[in-house]
C-alpha cells in the first residue's frame, strides 16, 4: 500500500518530469525534487569554482606577456573568467546554498573544480593552448548547456558563451602567430599542444559508460548531450584547426573514419584523470593554497561590504519609519 504522503510525492515527481519532458524551464521558486536541486548545486558550484581557479594558471603570465596588446587582452580575458564565476555562484545561490558554503566546500575538498586547472602554464604558448583548447572545450560543453533545464543556469550560459568565443580566438591567434614564427616558436607551440591536448579531452569527464551522473542529468535535461558526444564534437573541430596552422595532434592512433566523418583517438589516460580529480595532479595543492590565502586576505572586503549593507538598511528603516 502506498501511503497518501508518498502518493503525493510521486504525483509531484511525475508533474515535474512532464514539465521537463515538454521542454519547460524550471525557475527558482518552482517546486522541484530535492535530488534535482542537489544535482544542480553540485554541478553549478563546481562550474563556478572552475572559472575562478582557472584564473590562476593564466594570471601567471600577465607580467610576462610579450607585448602590451597581448597583456591587455589577457587581462580582459582573466577578468571575464572571474565574472563567469560570479554569474554561476549567483545561479547556484538561487537554489538555496550560500556563497560562503560553496567556498567552504571547495576548501574542504568536498566540491571539485575542473581537472584541467591542475596543470601548470610553463611558457607563453601555454596561454595560447589554454585559450584555444581549454576555452574551446569549455565552449562546446557550454553551448550545449545553454539549453539546460534550469533557467538561471541556462541564462548564465548564454552570456558566458558570448565571451568565451573571444577567448578561444585569442588562444588560436597566439598559436597561429607562433606557428608562423621561428623554429623555436614553432617548437614551443607544439610542446604546449602536446601537454594540453589530453587533459583538454579529460575536461568532458569519463566515458558515458563510466559516468555515474549522466543518467539523471539527461533525464532532467540538465545535460543535453553526453560526455562522449561533446568530446567527439571538440575533437572533430580541433583536429582541423590544428592542421590549418601546422600543429600535430599528439596521438599516433588518431584516424578519420571516412564513413562517419568523425576522428577516432587513442585511449585517454583515465588513471591520470582520477589522480588529478582526487587531488594529486601537478598543481592541486598550489591552486588550493592560493585560493585559501586570497580568500583570507579578502576577509576585510567582505566585512566592509556587510557593514555598508547594514548601515544602508538602518538608514532605509529610519527614513521609512
Ligand atoms: N574535472 O558522472 P560524471 C572554463 C567528476 S571552466 C573534475 O560524468 P557530470 C575556463 C564529476 O564532477 C569550465 N571533475 O559527472 C575557466 C563527478 O564527481 P562528483 C568548466 C570531473 O557532472 C577559466 C565524477 O567526476 N566547465 O571553461 O555528469 C579559464 C563523475 O563524472 C571532471 C564545467 O564545469 C573534470 N574534468 O559530468 C579558461 C561545465 N569530469 O561531482 C576556461 C559544467 C568529471 O560526483 N559541468 N568530473 O564528485 C559539466 O558539464 C559536468 O559536470 C562534467 C562532468 C562534464 C564536468
Image (tube, helix red, strand yellow):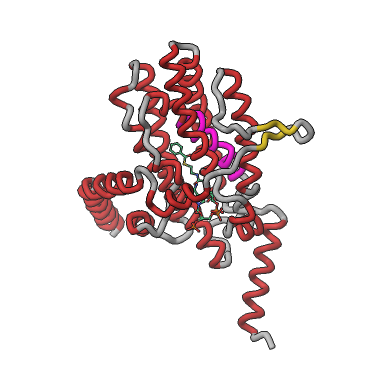
The answer to which of 207 and 252 lies nearer the viewer is 252
Query: Residue 130's x, y, as percent?
Result: 45, 32
Total labels: the figure holds 0
- Residue drawn at x 47%, y 52% is 274
- Residue 201 position within the rendered picture, expressed as x and y whole percent measured from the top left: 55, 40
Taking the image as drawn, is residue 5 in sight? yes
Magenta region, mostly helix, strand or loop?
helix
Q: In the rendered image, which quarter contains the N terminus?
A: bottom right
> Would residue 284 be found to the left or right of residue 215 on screen?
left
Q: What's the residue at 27%, 50% (across, down)? A: 292
- Looking at the rendered image, the quarter that the C terminus falls into is bottom left
Looking at this view, is 252 or 27 the one in front? 252
Point out residue 209 in the picture as x, y percentages from the top left corner.
64, 55
Q: Nearer the viewer, residue 105 or 121?
A: 121
| Stretch of the chain drawn in magenta | 130-145
Residue 6 higher or lower than 98, as above or below: below
Residue 281 in the magenta stretch? The answer is: no
Q: Residue furthest bottom?
A: 1
Q: Residue at x 49, y 28 (%)?
A: 193
Amino acid at each position: 500500500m502506498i501511503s497518501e504522503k508518498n502518493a503525493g510525492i510521486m504525483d509531484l515527481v511525475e508533474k515535474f518530469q512532464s514539465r521537463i519532458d515538454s521542454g519547460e524551464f524550471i525557475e527558482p521558486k518552482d517546486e522541484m525534487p530535492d535530488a534535482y536541486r542537489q544535482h544542480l548545486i553540485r554541478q553549478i558550484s563546481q562550474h563556478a569554482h572552475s572559472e575562478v581557479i582557472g584564473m590562476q594558471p593564466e594570471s601567471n603570465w600577465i607580467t610576462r606577456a610579450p607585448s602590451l596588446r597581448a597583456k591587455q587582452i589577457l587581462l580582459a580575458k582573466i577578468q571575464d573568467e572571474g565574472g563567469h564565476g560570479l554569474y554561476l555562484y549567483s545561479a547556484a545561490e538561487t537554489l538555496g546554498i550560500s556563497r560562503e558554503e560553496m567556498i567552504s566546500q571547495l576548501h574542504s575538498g568536498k566540491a571539485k573544480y575542473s581537472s584541467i586547472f591542475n596543470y601548470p602554464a610553463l611558457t607563453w604558448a601555454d596561454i595560447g593552448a589554454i585559450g584555444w583548447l581549454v576555452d574551446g572545450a569549455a565552449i562546446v560543453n557550454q553551448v550545449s548547456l545553454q539549453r539546460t533545464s534550469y533557467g538561471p543556469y541556462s541564462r548564465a550560459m548564454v552570456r558566458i558563451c558570448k565571451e568565451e568565443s573571444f577567448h578561444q580566438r585569442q588562444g588560436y591567434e597566439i598559436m597561429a602567430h607562433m606557428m608562423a614564427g621561428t623554429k623555436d616558436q614553432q617548437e614551443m607551440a607544439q610542446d604546449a599542444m602536446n601537454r594540453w591536448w589530453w587533459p583538454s579531452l579529460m575536461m568532458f569527464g569519463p566515458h558515458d559508460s563510466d559516468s555515474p551522473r549522466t543518467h539523471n542529468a539527461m533525464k532532467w535535461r540538465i545535460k543535453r548531450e553526453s560526455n562522449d558526444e561533446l568530446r567527439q564534437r571538440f575533437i572533430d573541430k580541433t583536429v582541423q584547426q590544428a592542421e590549418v596552422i601546422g600543429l600535430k595532434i599528439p596521438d599516433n592512433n588518431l584516424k578519420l573514419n571516412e564513413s562517419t566523418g568523425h576522428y577516432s583517438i587513442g585511449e585517454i589516460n583515465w588513471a591520470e584523470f582520477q589522480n588529478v580529480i582526487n587531488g594529486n595532479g601537478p598543481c592541486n595543492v598550489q591552486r588550493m593554497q592560493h585560493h585559501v590565502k586570497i580568500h583570507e586576505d579578502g576577509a576585510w572586503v567582505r566585512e566592509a561590504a556587510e557593514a555598508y549593507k547594514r548601515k544602508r538598511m538602518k538608514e532605509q528603516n529610519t527614513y521609512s519609519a
